[in-house]
Each structure stands twice: as structure tokens, then as C-alpha cells.
């Protein structure tokens, strides 16, 4: 016999509404209650009729994920985690890329009004906050990253200022004093580079060091080739960095490759630090020290926010959520003696 919500509720000793919230992923449910309901669901083998439920509610069961670049290791890893977490809610994810183009971002945001998807998660690079805020009022939206539409929609992000401060402080703690920053992007509005630049400056200021413009490099994109070119320019112009803080791991990997090609030893001659915690960083030579955001928690939190927007749009105020991060200290920075490092997982 097919189990029903009321059967699960009776076994778990909770209300039908609580079971419904657990199944749909909507509403706030205490963790111990959620676990009890999930145990009852598993015991009874309950399987929701997703198609019928969506049809009754006028929904599609589809959600959108708009990211700047599919080929970016950070965004591809994050997209995979979003898909995995969405499957637990019986959602299908439709993925698109914007390349940081304002027209592409506008088209995606305007397209959600046609209800092709029930809601949209977007990492906007180009649109200004006031334009995002206007669109956030018309459809279930969650913003991924640093752009916050004036507190009118949910946002999930890393504390880039604090993380960049910690990264730079780590390099200072190794005795490095000429720390280059690779990754400034004044042509973008998303704020990521600006915040990481701010954290870099905060750490230098606390150490009594004045920022040196010769050590700060602007890049067009955040790819390996840009990191390579920026490192080449630093060396060609005689900036003589003894450490590099790259604002993404891809930039750091490019800088690392350039250092090898120029005959520099890492970390003896120059320490290299990245940001994003991509899998490639673990297998660089030497393994790359990096800031690791909790990408799994990012995926889970954006989906919970989107569920709240879809199922209970008026009952939950917009949230500005900051997820944890940590430094993964590896061989690219661990001292002038060049200690070896083995990946731990």
C-alpha cells in the first residue's frame, strides 16, 4: 500500500504540515524533528508524487542556476553541489552562464517572469544593486556572491574581506613583506575583487606596511593566463615580490607556473596563496595554499532560501547569509625551507 503524509505524520508523532515542510524543503523545521520525520519517511518508503504536487501548485519543479562561467572550476564545483542538493528536494536544475554580461543577466532575470522555472539562483557580475533590487520583487530569487540588492532579496556569500585579511596575514606571518595582490577588477560591479583587495590592505595596515601600487595587479578575467601575465609583469618590472596573494586559485596557478618558468623556487623565493579551494589546487606542484569556502553549505543555504521564497514568500524576511571559510595551508607558502606537503584527502 502506498504511504501517505498522514501515515508518516502518525509514525513520527508530528503534524501533517511538518511532514509536508520536510518533504518540500520549505518552512523552518528543527533538526531533531526533521531527522525523526526523515526516519519515518524511510521506514514507510514514502515517495512524493512530485509531478502531481507541482501541477496542483502551478509549479514546474524546475529551478534556474545562472553562473558567470561554466568552465570555471569554482563555479562548476558549486553547480555540481547545487544539483546534488536540489535532487533531495525533487527539483531539477537548469543551468545557464552569463559571462558577466549585463544583457545576459537581464534576459535571465526577465525570463523568470514567464514561469519557465519556479525560482532562480544567480551570481550577478554586471548589474548594479538598484537594477537587481527592482527585479527581485517580481520572482523568487536568491543572489549568490557579493551583490546584495539593497536587502530586498536573499544573498549567500563568503566574507571576502575577512578571508583576504586572513590569507594576507598568513603570508605576513611567514616573514613576507613584499606581498603582491593579483586580481583587481575595477571594470566589474560584483564587488568580489574590491572586498578581497580591502582585506589585503587591512592586513598590511595592521602590520604597519603601506600598500605599494607596483605590487597590485589588475586583470581582465580570473583565469590562469591572467595570473601568468600578471606575474610576468611583476617580474619584468622589477617589483620583486616575496609572496603573491591571488584573488582566485586559477590566478594563483598561473602565477605559480610563471614562477617555475622564471626559475624561481616556491615557496623559498616567492610564496603563493590562492582563493576558492578548487580541487586542482590540491594537486599543483607545490600544492597550493588557498582560502576554502564551504561550498557545500553555500549550495544548501541558497536552496533553502529559494524554497522559502517559493513556498512562503511573505513569511520569511530576506536573509543575508555568510558561510564559513578556512585556510588550507599547503606547501606553496609553508616557509623558506620548502617543507613537503601531502594532500590529506
Image (cartoon, rainbow, N blue to C red):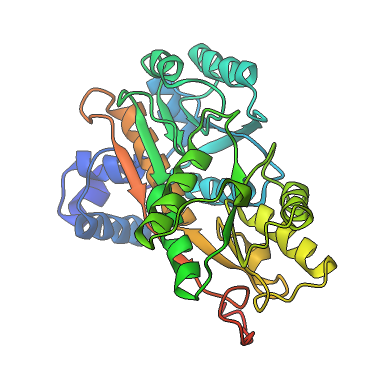
Q: State the residue at coordinates (69%, 72%).
A: 283
Task: Please give the name of the residue rendered at 80% of the width and 69% of the height, measured from the top-left corner.
Answer: 260
Total residue callouts: 0
In the image, residue 250 above or below residue 308: below
Return the x and y of residue 196 as percentages of the image width and height: 48, 47
The residue positioned 65% from the left and 65% from the top of the image is 281
In the rendered image, which quarter is residue 149 located in? top left
Residue 35's x, y, as percent?
27, 60
Of the pair 166 and 232, the residue shown nearer to us: 232
Whether residue 110 sits left or right of residue 263 in the image: it is left
Please say whether residue 46 is visible from this viewpoint.
Answer: no
Between 273 and 173, the residue placed more toward the observer is 173
Is residue 223 toward the left or the right of residue 45 in the image?
A: right
The front one of 190 and 98 is 190
**Residue 328 coordinates in the image, percent (x, y):** 50, 70
Q: Quadrant of residue 179?
A: bottom right
Q: Is residue 166 above or below residue 81?
A: below
273 sits left or right of 11 in the view? right
**Residue 35 in view of the camera:** yes
Residue shown at 57% from the left, 63% from the top: 178
Q: Is residue 266 above or below residue 76?
A: below
User: Which quadrant of the structure image shows residue 139?
Assistant: top left
- The spot of residue 334 in percent (x, y) is 56, 79
Give whichever of 291, 338 is nearer the camera: 338
**Taking 114 as reference, is 270 above or below it?**
below
Q: Quadrant of the C terminus?
A: bottom right
Amino acid at each position: 500500500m502506498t504511504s501517505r503524509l498522514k501515515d508518516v505524520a502518525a509514525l513520527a508523532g508530528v503534524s501533517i504540515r511538518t511532514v509536508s515542510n520536510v518533504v518540500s524543503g520549505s518552512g523552518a523545521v528543527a533538526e531533531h524533528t526533521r531527522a525523526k520525520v526523515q526516519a519515518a519517511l524511510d521506514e514507510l518508503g514514502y515517495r512524493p508524487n512530485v509531478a502531481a504536487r507541482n501541477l496542483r501548485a502551478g509549479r514546474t519543479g524546475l529551478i534556474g542556476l545562472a553562473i558567470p562561467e561554466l568552465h570555471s572550476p569554482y563555479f562548476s564545483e558549486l553547480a555540481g553541489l547545487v544539483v546534488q542538493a536540489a535532487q533531495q528536494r525533487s527539483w531539477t536544475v537548469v543551468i545557464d552562464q552569463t559571462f558577466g554580461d549585463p544583457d545576459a543577466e537581464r534576459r535571465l532575470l526577465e525570463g523568470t517572469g514567464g514561469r519557465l522555472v519556479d525560482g532562480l539562483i544567480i551570481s550577478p557580475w554586471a548589474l548594479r544593486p538598484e537594477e537587481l533590487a527592482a527585479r527581485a520583487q517580481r520572482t523568487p530569487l536568491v543572489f549568490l556572491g557579493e551583490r546584495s540588492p539593497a536587502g530586498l532579496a536573499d544573498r549567500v556569500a563568503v566574507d571576502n574581506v575577512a578571508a583576504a585579511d586572513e590569507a594576507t596575514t598568513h603570508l605576513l606571518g611567514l616573514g613576507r613583506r613584499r606581498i603582491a595582490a593579483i586580481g583587481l577588477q575595477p571594470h566589474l560591479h560584483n564587488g568580489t575583487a574590491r572586498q578581497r583587495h580591502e582585506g589585503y590592505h587591512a592586513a598590511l595596515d595592521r602590520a604597519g606596511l603601506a600598500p605599494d601600487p607596483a605590487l597590485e595587479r589588475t586583470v581582465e578575467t580570473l583565469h590562469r593566463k591572467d595570473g601568468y601575465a600578471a606575474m610576468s609583469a611583476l617580474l619584468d618590472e622589477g617589483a620583486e615580490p616575496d609572496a603573491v596573494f591571488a584573488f582566485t586559485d586559477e590566478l594563483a596557478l598561473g602565477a605559480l607556473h610563471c614562477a617555475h618558468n622564471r626559475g624561481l623556487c616556491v615557496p623559498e623565493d616567492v610564496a603563493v596563496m590562492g582563493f576558492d579551494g578548487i580541487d586542482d589546487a590540491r594537486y599543483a606542484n607545490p600544492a597550493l595554499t588557498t582560502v576554502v569556502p564551504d561550498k557545500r553549505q553555500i549550495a544548501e543555504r541558497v536552496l533553502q532560501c529559494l524554497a522559502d521564497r517559493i513556498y512562503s514568500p511573505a513569511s520569511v524576511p530576506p536573509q543575508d547569509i555568510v558561510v564559513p571559510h578556512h585556510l588550507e595551508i599547503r606547501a606553496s607558502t609553508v616557509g623558506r625551507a620548502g617543507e613537503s606537503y601531502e594532500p590529506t584527502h
